[in-house]
Image (cartoon, rainbow, N blue to C red):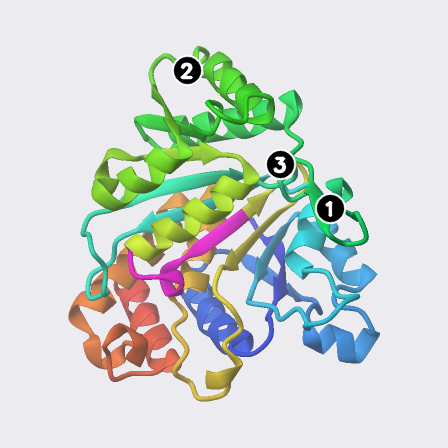
Amino acid sequence: MSQSIAVIKGDGIGPEIMEATLRVLDALDCGLTYQHIDAGLGALEKHGTLIPQESLDAIEKYGIALKGPLTTPIGKGFSSINVQLRRHFDLYANVRPAISFPGTRSRYDDIDMITVRENTEGAYLSDGQEMIDDGDTGISVIKVTRKGSERIMRYAFELAKNNGRKKVTAVHKANIIKTSSGLFQDVAREIAKEYPEIEFQEMIVDNACMQLVMNPHQFDVVVTTNLFGDILSDLCAGLVGGLGLAPGANIGEKAAIFEAVHGSAPDIEGKNIANPCALLLAAAQMLDHLGMTEKGTAIRQGIRTVLETRRDMVTPDMGGTGSTDSFAQALVEYVQSH
């Protein structure tokens, strides 16, 4: 069965790591057809906008997009492309795995956890922000709804159930922010009762930060609100070696976008030394989402094997002597031989 996906190559190192990723997907024989669409700086030069309507239409048509890193120009008048995409498609679940890989500079081994972040409300709503008192006072509103809390909580529990995970931890600040965070906590308790087979834990966000640093192995699936999730997911990436190994998915009812979380790294653009791991891991997440879990697992296992046994093929940031191309080639050889 053929599945068409929208592909956004991205800015900076984006085209290089996307080419590497598509090579590996082709080697896996996933039956994917790629529809390349414009977004980012290239789209701005070509169409006068960071994300043209035809690109939005293509994502809506295919329902799946694989996205390289994009640059949002600095200055007023440009809002983040990621935020635009989340709002346009109501991508309510931001899903960030943090998995340990060999040969990385990290504090811990054997971490395997997922942060599920509510992506559409909370502290990041632009319509609740204003300046008053002649610019001397800034006001920001935190808006949490029952609907938003229910769907992110149910998403987290379904993710745990369908992936053999044993525990869901809801992170909040209900002891102080009794309205918005309190509602999130109440909904978490209600939804948890529907999944008696999965262990449920609540944790206040400041304690969660400390526990993640001291004993991250106690966590499995962490679900939380927008602001806390933004912070905790990067903390978790730091536990396993940084954003170079951090994939992310933004998932809604009608569309899902899978991406490398790191930036476009214009300083190394065109040097063939960019690490493609984050985008490859995002592609693995995409394959899981499409029901091709064996192929998703093959990418993750391939990365693990290449990092352990083919240091000459690995990019310099991971301590290797290879290139973006050689890393992709080693992975192609792995998946074709397994």
Task: Write the residue at 67% across / 53% down.
Answer: 83
Image spot of residue 15 (x, y percent): 55, 76
Q: Does residue 230 appear in the picture of this structure?
A: yes
Name the spot of residue 212 as percent of width and height, x first: 29, 42
Alpha-carbon span between mark 3 and mark 2 = 25 Å
Q: What residue lies at 48% left-to-right and 34% top-to-bottom?
A: 224
x and y percent of residue 228 in the render? 49, 40
Q: Which residue is mark 1?
A: 126
Which region shows up in magenta? 240-249
- The answer to whether the residues at label 1 and label 2 have Cβ atoms under 8 Å apart is no
Q: SS for tag 2?
A: loop
Decide which of tag 1 and tag 2 comes sooner along the chain. Answer: 1
Query: Within the magenta stretch, is there residue 161?
Result: no
Q: Compute the Cα span from label 1 to label 2.
A: 34 Å
Q: Against 333, is 148 above or below?
A: above
Q: Amino acid at mark 1?
A: Ser
Q: Which numbered disc, 1 or 2, marks the residue closer to the eye?
A: 1
Badge 1 marks a residue whose secondary structure is helix
* Disc 3 target residue: 122
Query: Label 3 to label 1, Cα distance in Å?
Result: 10 Å
| Label of residue 195 in the image | 2
Left or right: 198 with respect to 262? left
Quadrant of residue 144 in the image?
A: top right
Task: Work out whether residue 255 or residue 263 is closer to the camera in this orientation and state it.
Answer: 263
Asked if residue 240 is positioned above or below residue 310 in the image, the reply reads: above
**Rendered view: 245 above or below 141:** below
Q: Is residue 241 magenta?
A: yes
Q: Is residue 311 left or right of residue 151?
A: left
The amino acid pointed to by label 3 is Gly
Secondary structure of the residue carrying numbered label 3:
loop
Q: Residue at x 49, y 16 (%)?
A: 191
**Where residue 113 sits: x, y (%)?**
33, 41
